[in-house]
Amino acid sequence: MTVYTPPGRTGSIVEFRSRYDHWIGGEYVPPASGEYFENPTPVTGQTFCEVARGNAEDIERALDAAHGAAPAWGRTSVTERANVLNAIADRIEANLEKIAVAESWENGKAVRETLGADIPLAVDHFRYFAGAIRAQEGSISEIDGDTIAYHFHEPLGVVGQIIPWNFPILMATWKLAPALAAGNAVVLKPAEQTPASILYLMDIIGDLLPPGVVNVVNGFGAEAGKPLASSSRIRKIAFTGETTTGRLIMQYASANIIPVTLELGGKSPNVFFSDVAAAHDDFYDKALEGFTMFAFNQGEVCTCPSRALIQSDIYDQFVGDALKRTEAAIQGNPLDTETMVGAQASNDQLEKILSYIDIGQAEGAKILTGGARADLGGDLSGGYYVQPTVFEGKNSMRIFQEEIFGPVVSVTDFADYDDAIKTANDTLYGLGAGVWTRNGTTAYRAGRDIEAGRIWTNCYHAYPAAAAFGGYKGSGVGRENHKMMLDHYQQTKNLLVSYSGVRDGFF
Amino acid sequence: MIDDDGSERPARVAVTDAAAELLARLRRRHGDLMFHQSGGCCDGSSPMCYPAGDFLTSDADVHLGDLSLSDDGEEFVVPVWMSRAQFEYWSHTHLTIDVVPGRGAGFSVEAPEGVRFLIRSRLLTDAELATLGPARG
């Protein structure tokens, strides 16, 4: 067990700058307006640094730097680019503990997650795309004996990326690694709730990249995000967030006729069939952990398994055991490696979660455990903590239909297979789902019948780089992870070549 | 909300005094405003406030109502929209737009003020539901 010293106190392994400017052209550049905003830690609610408040002028400056760097970066060999990505991965790995503590402090998530998931996954992601770009090949089509179609991959050029706050470094990595591997230059806007983590990372890896290849502009969505998303100087925009902003970004992209990739969240069903409880063995234990995954990252995950659907004949027993497992989750200081559930990322998140706990009760759902803000005492009293909460209700209720983005799961039962699939698919979204069964046929059929992009089968919340991730229905457009992600950052160049010396005969 | 025939009828949306005061201030800076209720992850499930017309609504949206407000005696309205598909699941609830301290992402115009609009919900009564009928598109 380790309890890390909070950044800013003597003995901490993390030292944040007191003020972060924009990272443009390989150096820190003060904001055009001269203004900064305060950055509080959700662990205690206290401000720990201030961050440049970007505007359209800063975005233009970053785009200038990116356009300056893109042509040369796009021409480097894939070997060179892969070497850079591998060097980034090595550098992150060598500083993993520091980066994990820094991200935990800014986001509020338990450090056991940043140490064991977020940062190791980011390391692996850079390595995966270093390998993928080395192995990527173009193609040829032999049209006829004298005519060949060659297909080359070319970078798009300069791309915009807007990053969410729930995994500040991993979500930035999901977007950066394929974009850089493919030879693009990037202007990246972090979320205003977590603006410092990525700059803490740039302090560690920034020297490995040619100046201008990655540029980071912080600020508010309306002031910095909008000028980036609506700029005619980007060739693609990638966004992770919610549906209204997603639509707005598509709208801006339509004006510039550029592609978008969007990951907009979900209301993921976690389906437990009867045979899960056929024995009280390791598999049953794993399934109970799978249920409790709703509290992973305090529920601030787009794929949070926030609807648990449990077959009627095991409902009472399974829910009883699942409640015990939920109540055993340790909530506390995010910098303590024993802590499983940390703080929500911001005060407005906390307020939103509490407002959903209110409407859930008003709609007649029953709280089986939790259901309130948690006061952890001492310095942590000012932080944003919510008790892991289990509701029992019906799938038509708003708590079953809307993404709460907190440690809240809504539980209901189903009679048979058809009922399970109908309920699982009764949602506007289709990002993730979980299927738990000992029967391979049921697992396969349910996985194919549920309308979602990722079906965790007898597992949940695993995010390996080689598995495609993205949404059906309202959950978005495009995929992240997997080598197919390179396509989202590349143009196809076709050279249609005739080796014939004979005229066509039309004229 | 006053209906076309002048009769009072219940509304689907309302606003707290604090949110109304903030909207008046934001309007001085950004001009007329609109809300679109968001769904999905991160800052979703929250009302997004934009300069009027910035977000293009369509047949895929429902106009829940207009917030009738005033600023120093000058009357103005802020329309509130939601996607039609989402409304299917929300139609039985009454929504009050409130504001809390916070740091919302997204392009909503209040975020730089260090505050965030928030929806507070209650169930519509049977009488309200009977009078309201389906929301107008």
Image (tube, rainbow, N blue to C red):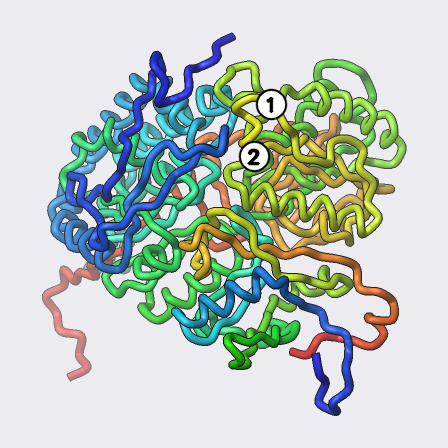
Classify residue A41 as left or right of residue B119: left
Q: Quadrant of the C terminus of chain A?
A: bottom left
Q: Nearer the viewer, residue B64 or A138?
A: B64
Query: To which quarter of the image does residue A147 belong?
Result: bottom left
| Rendered location of residue A351, percent (x, y) | 61, 45
Q: Nearer the viewer, residue A142 or A313?
A: A313
Instruction: Name the chain letter of the residue that bears numbered label 1.
Output: A
Query: To which quarter of the image does residue A465 belong?
Result: top left
Whether residue A478 appears in this view of the structure is no
Residue extending farthest to the bottom is: B5
Lower position in the chain sequence, tag 1 or tag 2 = 1
Q: Answer above or below: position of A326 versus A485.
A: above
Classify residue A242 as left or right of residue A224: right
**Residue drawn at x 15%, y 55% as measured from the top left:** A64
Q: Nearer the viewer, residue A350 or A89?
A: A350
Q: Answer above or below: position of A437 versus A329.
A: below
Q: Secondary structure at mark 2?
A: loop
- Amino acid at the residue labelled 1: Gly
| Rendered location of residue A308, percent (x, y) | 73, 38
Q: Circle 1 is placed at which residue position?
A: A377
Residue neighbourhood size for the residue with mark 2, other residues' Cα within 10 Å, grouped as few (<14), some (14–19), many (≥20): many
Q: Circle 2 is placed at which residue position?
A: A384
**Residue drawn at x 29%, y 17% as measured from the top left:** A94
Q: Are marks 1 and 2 in contact (CB under 8 Å)?
A: no
| Rendered location of residue A496, percent (x, y) | 21, 61
Residue neighbourhood size for the residue with mark 1, other residues' Cα within 10 Å, grouped as few (<14), some (14–19), many (≥20): few
| Rendered location of residue A426, percent (x, y) | 72, 53
**Residue drawn at x 60%, y 50% as measured from the top left:** A430
